[in-house]
Image (cartoon, rainbow, N blue to C red):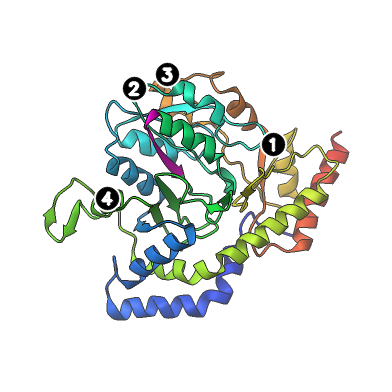
Amino acid sequence: MNVPLVDLRKQYAPLKDEILAGIGRVFDGMQLFLGENVQALEKEFAQFCGAQYGIGVSDGTAALQIILRAMGIGAGDEVITVSHTFIATAEAIVLAGAKPVFVDIDPQTYLMDVAQVESKINARTKAILPVHLYGQTVDMEPLREIASRHGVQVIEDACQAHGAEYKGRRAGSLGDAAAFSFYYSKNLGAYGEGGFIATNDGDLARRIRMIRDHGSERRYLHDLIGWNGRLDEIQAVVLRAKLPHLEEWNEKRRQHAILYAELLKGTPAVTPVECPGNKHVYHLFVIRAPKRDELQAWLKSQGIFTGIHYPVPIHLQNAFQSSGYQAGDLPVSERVVGEILSLPMYAELETDQIEHVTNAIKTFFDQKP
């Protein structure tokens, strides 16, 4: 039995006719950008998140960059974030002209260790950028309290957290602004690239809309320096077709996670922790395991495809050699990257596939005591 890490075809099949019909209507009208589908998606997904304003953009990285720019964050400023995430989080900070300042992660959740944040704040700190990694939100209440005391903004990197909840509120409504990615493998994914910004700040939303469209509110009149960060109508059609199913898909992911955890009890594999008050939506199901590389190779030999998210922390990447960080600075981040393994996870995963994965893991550890 083959078990892919993600199977997009299974999700597409029941939505195929609806999606193709919607794309056909776009081609009939030929309004390819910022048309009725983008405008409708902006309202629908903002409402889903519990935010007042939503702005569709070209991708998740652009979402982060545009938020930073709209907040006036740039040269000489610092933004506190984590190193254990996809490089786009820190990349956006650098591309805005600011400096990322890294804190370590919690060894149980792999999320920002909020207790380390306040010591990193200084006069140059303009924002804190927590990453809701793997589908679970950072502990936002104490983080917001710290930010409020110091007068800094909070930007959610919610690119892996579509529908995740914290104390009854959804990701996207927990900070001053939030960035989402609609990369194709996300819980809510486009068939290409796409991104989204959610906020409750009307003035910020206006600047964001302008920046994503060359700094313009009216064609050929430009009040700000912006760039082309628009979401296209084709991707908006896909996302609108999928959005009504997102809660159901997330619940299926949660049920898969429960089954994985139950079947892996008694093995050396450490399964994910869901924090009290949180609703984890399991964009990824990440275990920690000894002999990780050997385990991954064994699973592949059994037709099971896995991933490592992410093998090298950002502060140790070649692109960040000039950042002043070195090995040993973030010990938890550096340790977990040698142990984490993402198992197959998507809403359409079958029980027998999960059983095949967990049986293969058990067999591996029986052979490798």
Tag 2: amino acid: Ala
Q: In this view, does 349 lie to the left or right of 154?
A: right
Examine the image and state in which quarter residue 43 appears: bottom left
Mark number displayed over residue 203: 4
Q: Earlier in the sequence, mark 2 or mark 3?
A: 2
Cα–Cα gap, marks 2 and 1: 43 Å
Picture residue at 53% right of the left edge, 44% below the top: 132
Where disc 3 sits, the SS reads: loop
Type of amino acid under label 1: Asp
Marks 4/3: CA–CA distance? 36 Å
SS label for mark 1: helix
Q: Is residue 88 left or right of residue 96?
A: right
**Quick one: label 4, few (<14), some, or many (20+) residues within 10 Å?**
few
**With respect to residue 144, does 250 lie above or below?**
below
Based on the picture, tell me whether residue 168 belongs to the magenta stretch. Answer: no
Query: Can you see residue 70?
Result: yes
- Residue at point 57%, 74% (across, down): 13
Q: Residues within 10 Å of mark 1 (few under 14, many from 20)?
A: some
Name the residue carrying label 2.
123
Q: What residue type is labelled 3?
A: Gly
- Is 50 or 344 nearer to us in this picture? 50
Residue extent of the magenta highlight: 150-156
Where 139 sits versus 34, above or below?
Answer: above
Q: Are marks 2 and 1 in contact (CB under 8 Å)?
A: no
Return the x and y of residue 247 as percentages of the image width and height. Answer: 58, 64
Q: How crowded is mark 3: few (under 14 residues within 10 Å), some or many (20 or more)?
A: few
Label 2 vs label 1, nearer the camera: 2
Q: Contact (CB < 8 A) between labels 4 and 3?
A: no
Residue 293 is marked as 1
Question: Which residue does the numbered mark 3 point to in the structure image?
Answer: 324
Closer to us: 59 or 64 = 64
